[in-house]
Image (spheres, rainbow, N blue to C red):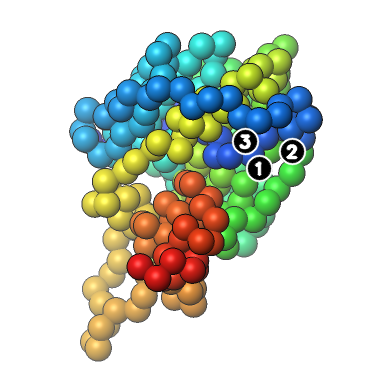
Amino acid sequence: MNIYRSHPVTALVIAALGFGGPLSSEVSAQTSAPANPVKLTTATTADKTASVGLPDGWTLTNGDNGYVSVTGPHDAKILLGAIAIAKDGPAGPGAPGSDVMFALPFSGGLKEKLTTILVAGAPSLGLPKPAITYASEVRTRLPMCSRFLGTLVYGSDSNAFEGIICSLKPDWLGYYKNIIFLLQVPSSRAAEDRPVVEQIAASYRVTPAMFRLMLATYTALPPAPPGGTAPMMPGLAPYQDPTHSDCFDYNIIRESPPWEVPMHCGGIQPY
């Protein structure tokens, strides 16, 4: 099943995920030590490409090709591995009937890309255009990814969110993938729900074969020139290259400290 055809692209990218930080700048003051870990039961997508741990009361609502959608109490939402295809070019809408969600210069900021995805995706979920307030942006250890904290307001519903967007280099036709991880919970419950959604997000797993497909260019590469092929992500250190799935796992999904990260991923562990 094709991830883009099985779900409207706009629905894929209204995502919800948190990874180990406050959902808003106010939550850290409200929250002391994290709550005790909850018991998680592993749920696997029907195509066996991804899995996630769920506490009681949470449901895997959808997922395939590495994408996972989870809902929980109090209208909390977690979507993992959501992909939005963009065209490198002047700002504009996507092509009707295609997988392309929008056009933006690849050189543009990640905040602009995330904003475009959230706004364009709202109608497919029956939501009004959101008012988005960003509290912070922090670059991750992979240069094509940033982590954002902020607030999404749909009508009268205010939601705290924390998310990561990774924008991969355009293919030879100018199309590029944006991989989204975003957590969304009611603002009034951000302090209470943060530890649970972060624990769920950290349990997300994708098979190596599916992960390679997620990171592959949208358009297949043309035949290689004589003499071999160039690296998929030239000019990056190995630990910065998202095509190394273990490095992406350490540096983005779990944000592991250097002493837990192997040397080939930029850490100090000699394995």
The reply to whether the C-beta atoms of the residues labelled 2 and 1 are less than 8 Å apart is yes
Mark 2 or 1, nearer chain start: 2
What amino acid is found at the position of numbered circle 2 in the picture?
Tyr
Inter-mark Cα distance, 1 to 3: 6 Å
Residue at x 71% of width, y 15% of height: 188
Q: CA distance from mark 2 to mark 1?
A: 7 Å
**Could you tell me the amino acid type at mark 1?**
Phe
Amino acid type assigned to the residue bearing label 3 in the image: Glu
Which mark is drawn over residue 162?
3
Question: In the rendered view, would you say 10 is above or below 100?
Answer: above
Asked which secondary structure carries label 3, the reply is: strand
Q: Residue at x 27, y 29 (%)?
A: 44
- Disc sitting over residue 148 in the figure: 1
Where is residue 196 shown, x and y percent of the image? Answer: 52, 25
Q: Check disc 2 and report the residue beneath it.
A: 134
Would you place residue 206 above or below residue 56 in this image? Answer: below
* Relative height, residue 29 to residue 128 (above, below): below
- Residue 192, horizontal then vertical, whole percent: 63, 19
The C terminus lies in quadrant? bottom left
Instruction: Tell me which label, 3 or 2, sits earlier in the chain.
Output: 2
Which residue is drawn at the image coordinates 27% and 52% (left, top)? Answer: 208
Residue at coordinates 48% horizontally, 16% vertically from top-left?
Answer: 72
What number of labels is visible?
3
Residue 164 visible to the viewer: yes
The correct choice, above or below, for 261 with respect to 24 in the image is: below
Q: Nearer the viewer, residue 213 or 139?
A: 139
Secondary structure under tag 1 reads strand
Instruction: Describe residue 197's horizontal placement relative to residue 192 as left or right.
Output: left
Question: Gap between marks 3 and 2, in whole Å?
Answer: 10 Å
Which mark is first along the chain, 3 or 1?
1
